[in-house]
Every structure is written in C-alpha cells, then in structure tokens.
C-alpha cells in the first residue's frame, strides 16, 4: 500500500483494480465449532466422514406389505395372490416376523424390511382399502390380496443408499445450507467446524445525522446508511457491529474508531470526498495507510480503502463508503460483499450476470462504469432491464424497487 493520503495515492482506480486491491487484504478467518442449528450459510472447515450407513438398514419406501416376490410373481397369469398377514412393523421398530412363501408383514414407510422379504407391495396394489371400506379394522385383516403386478425389489431402500459407512459425506469448503445441516444431523453430529463469521464495525459520520427514533429536527436527516449496510452485512453472513454516529470532528471520529478496532473489517459512511468536513480520509492517513480513495464508477466514485492500526499493531481493513445512500449500497455490493464472502471462506464471490436489453436510456457522460438500478424480467427467451426511475445517488427508493443492477461499462 501507498503510505499516507493524498500524496502518491492513486486518484481513481478502475472497478477491477479497486476490487483486486481490496480482496488482497483478506483471507478466510479461523475455524470455530458451532451447533449445526447456528451455522447456516457458513463454510465447513472440516471433512465430515460417515461412521455408519444411511439408511442403516434396508427399509420400506412405502406404506404397504413386505412380501417374498416368489409369492406374487405369477399374478399376470394366475390372477390376484392371497397372502396371510403375520405381523406388522412401524418406523423405529425392529421386525420380529420372518416372511415365508404366501405370507406378508404389514409395513410402514421407513420401517426395516423383515427377514425373508424382498419386495414391498403398496396398500394401493392390494384389496386393503376395499376391506376397510367394508368395515374391517386393520387388526382384523388376516389376509390380503395383491391385485397388481409388482417388480422384484420394488419400494425397498437399501442400507447405505444415501451414504455409505466411511464415505466423505460433506467436504471442507461446503456451504452449510439446509441440506448440508440435514446431512450432518443424519450422521449424529450436533456440532461442526466452520469458518467463523467476520465482525464488521459500522460508523456513520456527519453532524447532520439523527438516529432513527429521535425527534426530527429541521436541517437534519435520519441515518439510513448504517442500517442498510448492517442489513447487507448480515445478509451475506457477517456480524454487524453498529457503533452509531461520529460527528464531524477528529475527537469524535477517533473515539468511534477506537471502538471498532477489534473488528475484522471497519466500515464508515461519508467523509471520503472533498468537502470541508470530509475528515475520514484524513484520520485514515494519520492512523494507518490508504490505498485509494476514488473509483471509476457511478454511483460511488468517492470510495476509500486502507487500514487502521490497532493498539496491538494489528491492521484493521477499512472501507470508507460514500455518504449518498445509493452510492453506499452499490459500493457495498461491488466491493465489500466479496470481501465478507472471502473471509467466510466462500469460493464463489461474484453474483450471476446475464446480458439484458435495457428499456430506457443511460447517458454515460464521463466514461465511468455505471450501475443503474433496474427490474430484470425474462420475456420471449431474453432478459429485459427496466430502470426503476430517477437514478440519482440520493434516491434510495431506486434500490428498493430494483432486483438487479445494470452494469454499463
């Protein structure tokens, strides 16, 4: 990094240069042990190897009757087969009856297959429903007739069909979604090792700001950036640490910074442009180093990146977001979101990109990359992007109405 702002600091980087510069500063965080209920979206930091077959025993995929195939194989020639019902087994029970020719065991979905059985006949392929409609109780049905042809092995899930004993069930680097959490639970795991979530400290700056809930004052505005950024941090897997509003003086700014130096990333909003009260970049230059402070993009041109030095000498990465709310959120999506994902250990950092036909005009008058807020739809086999209205960097509703960003190089 280039030491001290502004001398020697690159004035305006391309989006690719800025993003690369930021991502170089980050790496996956250390692992932690967490309950499988509390690791949704985190990245697995260990291989999970099964110590059992899943399912552990051959079991039924249907409610019906466990039979020997030889007892029903000639239905097409001889007509329905009549079998004696010798027992019943439910899920969670072990069968005690042995199926021999001309017999059947009533079986529920998930129950282990009794010894001697090799096929399960669903209730629908027998006369059970007819018998019940005639008033027979389940425990009064001593014989059943199989009325339809069933192939050998039908409706039986073999032991280990899902996971075999000794198999790698979940690989290090997997994202823990509902399905992965379910796999871990099926193996009896209550906890797993995952890459810990990054703590992201958030500071809003400006004498003009009020906290939501405070009494409205003429000339003041409510702080929306902290809350929008905190929500985005949480959405992408980080832990937001909201430190409130720093007023436009060095003492207030330094006091807030001191509170955030234990975080994995420190974000400020506003104070990185060229105004008389834009002091964030000056504090960054005095307490750390700055890599860049402007990016060739619209919105979000005034974007600072560098690091602050903590009391222990640790470098705490810092992203200074613009003050305009749309600029702050666009810059977050393009620059901060990938950094959070990298700290989480994610391999894929980019969002899906499609080519779309723009409905409306975008004037790129200064050559910066434009991020227009749009609603993307698919019609006639093509994607279409409709502008959400006024594209000013202070029009936060343009983001609220959008489901995508139209990138116009």
Image: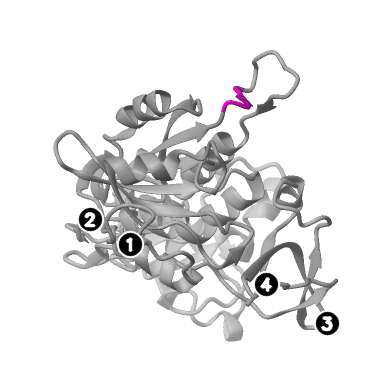
Task: Check residue 45 in the rendering and tell me which mark sits there, or answer none.
Answer: 2
On screen, residue 176 versus residue 212, left or right, reads: left
CA separation, marks 2 and 4?
45 Å
Dot 1 alpha-carbon crowd within 10 angstroms: few under 14, some 14 to 19, many 20 or more? some
Mark 3 / mark 4, whichever is N-terminal? 4
Answer with the quarter of the image where residue 218 lies. Answer: top right
Q: At numbered mark 2, what does the secondary structure look like: helix, strand or loop?
A: loop
Magenta segment: 207-211
Dot 4 alpha-carbon crowd within 10 angstroms: few under 14, some 14 to 19, many 20 or more? few
| 3 or 4: mark nearer the eye | 4
On screen, residue 74 versus residue 136, left or right, reads: left
Determine contact: label 3, label 2, CB under 8 Å: no
In the displayed structure, would residue 354 be above or below residue 294? below
Q: Which residue is the site of mark 3?
A: 380
Question: Relative to the observer, which residue lies in front, 7 or 172?
Answer: 7
Determine contact: label 2, label 1, CB under 8 Å: no
Q: At numbered mark 4, what does the secondary structure look like: helix, strand or loop?
A: loop
From this viewpoint, is residue 85 visible? no
């Amino acid at each position: 990094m280039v030491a001290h702002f502004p001398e020697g600091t690159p004035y305006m980087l391309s989006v690719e240069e800025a993003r690369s510069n930021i991502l170089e500063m980050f790496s996956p965080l250390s692992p932690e042990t967490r309950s499988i209920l509390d690791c949704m979206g985190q990245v697995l930091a260990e291989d999970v190897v099964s110590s059992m077959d899943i399912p552990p025993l051959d079991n039924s995929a249907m409610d019906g009757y466990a039979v020997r195939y030889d007892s029903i194989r000639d239905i097409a020639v001889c007509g329905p087969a009549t079998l004696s019902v010798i027992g019943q087994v439910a899920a969670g029970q072990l069968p005690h009856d042995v199926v021999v020719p001309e017999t059947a065991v009533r079986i529920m979905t998930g129950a282990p297959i009794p010894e001697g059985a090799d096929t399960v006949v669903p209730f629908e392929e027998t006369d059970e429903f007819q018998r019940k409609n005639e008033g027979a109780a389940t425990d009064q049905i001593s014989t059943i007739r199989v009325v339809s042809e069933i192939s050998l092995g039908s409706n039986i899930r073999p032991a280990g069909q899902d996971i075999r004993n000794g198999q790698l069930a979940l690989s290090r680097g997997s994202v823990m979604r509902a399905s992965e959490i379910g796999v871990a639970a099926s193996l009896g795991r209550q906890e797993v090792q995952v890459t810990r979530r990054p703590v992201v400290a958030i500071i809003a700056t400006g004498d003009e700001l009020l906290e939501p809930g405070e009494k409205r004052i003429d000339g003041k505005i409510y702080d929306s950036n902290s809350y929008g950024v905190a929500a985005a941090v949480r959405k992408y897997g980080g832990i937001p640490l909201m430190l409130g509003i720093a007023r436009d003086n060095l003492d207030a700014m330094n006091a807030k910074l001191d509170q955030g130096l234990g975080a994995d990333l420190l974000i400020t909003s506003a104070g990185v442009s060229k105004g008389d009260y834009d002091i964030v970049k000056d504090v960054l230059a005095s307490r750390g180093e700055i890599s860049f402070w402007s990016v060739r993009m619209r919105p979000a041109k005034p974007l600072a990146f560098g690091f602050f030095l903590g009391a222990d000498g640790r470098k705490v990465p810092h992203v200074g977001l613009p003050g305009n709310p749309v600029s702050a959120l666009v810059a977050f999506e393009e620059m901060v979101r990938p950094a959070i994902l990298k700290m989480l250990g994610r391999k894929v950092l980019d969002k899906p990109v499609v080519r779309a036909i723009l409905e409306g005009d975008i004037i790129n008058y200064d050559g910066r990359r434009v991020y227009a807020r749009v609603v993307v739809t698919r019609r006639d086999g093509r994607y279409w992007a409709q502008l959400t209205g006024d594209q000013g960097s202070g029009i936060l509703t343009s983001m609220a109405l959008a489901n995508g960003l139209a990138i116009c190089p």
